[in-house]
Amino acid sequence: MSYEHVFDQLEIAPDPFAVCELKGRCDLGLGQDATATLHYILRGTGSLHVRGAPDIPVGPGCLILVPALQRHSLRSTGGHSTPVPDCKPAELNLRHLLKDDASDQEGQLIALCAHVRVGLRGAEDVIDLIRNPMVERIAPDSPLRPAMDLLLHELCRPGAGSRAMIRAVLTQCLIEMLRRRLQDEDGALRWMAALRDPQVWEALRAMLDAPGDPHTVDSLAERVGLSRSAFANRFSAAYGSGPIDLLRDLRLRKAATLLRDTNIPVKRVAHLVGFSSRTAFSRLFEQRTGQSPLQFRKDHAVGRAS
């Protein structure tokens, strides 16, 4: 499978998005979600903090993709004394926020934030294979600059089709981000290299499609017609880690989606994603996210019974 084929098969869907405004020197906790999050900095300077990783400096034109289940926050370095972080629907007319000569914009950091789902035809959520944040800094001569100018136009003067246009622009930006990472041989995209090996890809797709199935190294090797050792070596060489490490992450991300979107009891969620014990599942989920399954559900599914 070539990279060109991979891009042809990509299906990218930015979910409903919001515009986040940070006024003055303050933080806006963005928590963690069951899906990846894309941030584009429209104005201001600051940093994005991801738990367990160095801060990422941000400024206008900075595009950041944060993988699923990574707790993170935006920090503004503005000078106002009263911090007023806020988050507003993107349909709002933002012309007043983006004027270069607006006297009340000193110290503001404004970001467009959207959840992102990326699949390949025949497999869902391949973006869950990304492990580390990806950062793209869009320079004035970048191929993405016209697209971002169009995005700003749609934000400032929303009309019929604006949301669809913004989704299309975000899709273009994500494709360009992935393409540039491949050109630079970025280790964060080793999963895309894995897609070029048909047998490794077959194993990846099996885990993506049904992370709760009782996969083992032996069963996956048998599925793709390789010996256990040959499969384990080829998988690690292509993807950068063993299949069971990846399977554990995919199960936790699937569990997070079920906790967010359904009322299924935690014990049943654990079983559906491949854990025989609720206790073992809860312990691993809390190690990964910093929250118990019940607390995660409470924070992400307000109004649902646990």
Image (spheres, grey):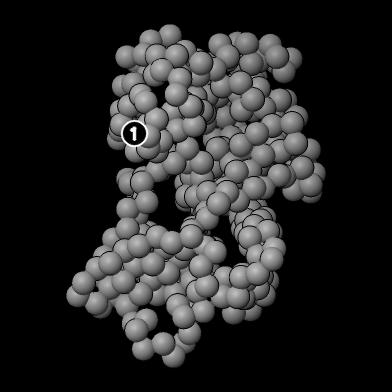
**Viewer-proximal residue, 220 or 60?**
60
Whole-percent x and y of residue 254? 51, 28
Q: Is residue 306 left or right of residue 26?
A: right
Q: Secondary structure at mark 1?
A: helix
Q: Is residue 191 left or right of residue 65?
A: right
Residue 259 visible in rendering: yes
Instruction: Say above or below: 43 vs 255.
Output: below
Crowding around mark 1 (Cα neighbors within 10 Å: few <14, some 14 to 19, many 20+) is some
The location of residue 9, given as percent across then percent down, is 77, 42
Judged from this view, the residue extending furthest toward the left is: 81
Q: State which quarter of the image contains the N terminus.
A: top right
67 relative to 237 in the view: left or right: left
Q: Residue at x 44, y 24 (%)?
A: 263
Percent x, y of residue 42: 48, 71
Please say if 115 is above or below 163: above
Q: Is 181 above or below relative to 10? A: below
Position of the C terminus by quadrant: top left
Please name whichever residue, 211 or 186, is drawn nearer the observer in this view of the structure: 211
Q: At 60% from the left edge and 11% from the top edge, which residue is drawn?
A: 218
Question: Which residue occupies 56% across, 11% down?
Answer: 214
Which residue shows up at 57% across the image and 49% down it?
Answer: 15
Corner quadrant of residue 10: top right
**Where residue 285 appears, x then y in whole percent?**
36, 27
Seen from the viewer's position, the closer of residues 90 and 36 is 90
Q: Is residue 285 left or right of residue 81?
A: right
Q: Can residue 142 be seen?
A: no
Total marks in image: 1
- Residue 183, relative to residue 189: is it above or below? below
Amino acid type indicated by mark 1: Lys
**Residue matched to label 1:** 298
